[in-house]
Amino acid sequence: MMSKPMQDAFNEQMKHEFYSSYLYLSMSAYCDSLNLPGLSQWMRAQAQEEVKHAMKILDHLLDRGGRVELRQIDRPPAEFASAREVFDQAHRHEQQVTASINQVYGLAVDERDFASTVFLDWFVQEQVEEEKTSGLLAEQLRMVGEDRPGLLMLDRELGQRRAGREATAAET
């Protein structure tokens, strides 16, 4: 059985993952409003990936005899200054998620909950990839600047990512 502090930490992390999904869905809608369907599609796929992360945590809690507590999710922003700001904010958000995962991992170590540390290893590696990808895309949008043809090329490239699939470095 998982300790109460571990259950609380996982339930809070699950909330963060669901919030991430809401945030990326909001970003997707904003990109769509800019007539950037590729960026919109990329963010929509990201939103679906975040739901999968939350479900992994839910399953871990259940598998370990823990109690699932669905917590209230804050409303994400709906307006952004630009496509560049969307990806800058996404990168900052992924850094916050990494810090949160690291806190849960640290608690698991302190609690000597080795099953949870093994489970969280996947999330730690996933966050390395998430920060790398979001940082790369934010930087590419900075390089594009106000160059519309460059933005449209990046939009077309990001549109290749399909919802429901995990992103790979080759897709970004």
Image (cartoon, rainbow, N blue to C red):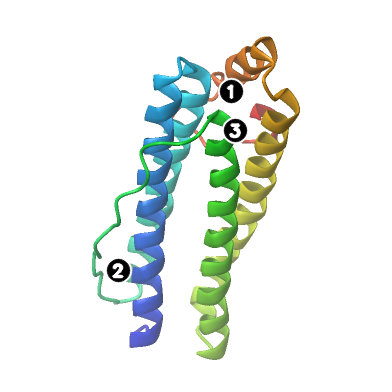
Q: How many other residues sit within 10 Å of disc 2, few (<14), some (14-19) or many (≥20)?
A: some
Where is residue 104? Give x, y as percent: 50, 75
Mark 3 residue type: Arg
Which residue lies at the image location 40% right of the left edge and 76% below the top edge?
9
Which residue lies at the image location 68% right of the left edge and 43% below the top edge?
135
Q: Secondary structure at mark 2?
A: helix
Quadrant location of the N terminus in the rendered image: bottom left
Mark 1 residue type: Leu
Quarter of the view holding residue 10? bottom left
Q: Which residue is mark 2?
A: 62
Q: Secondary structure at mark 3?
A: helix
Q: CA distance from mark 2 to mark 1?
A: 36 Å
Label 1 or label 3, whichever lies nearer to me, is 3
Q: Which residue is mark 3?
A: 84
Mark 2 residue type: Leu
Q: Which residue is mark 1?
A: 158
Where is residue 161? Give x, y as percent: 54, 25
* Residue 71 badge: none
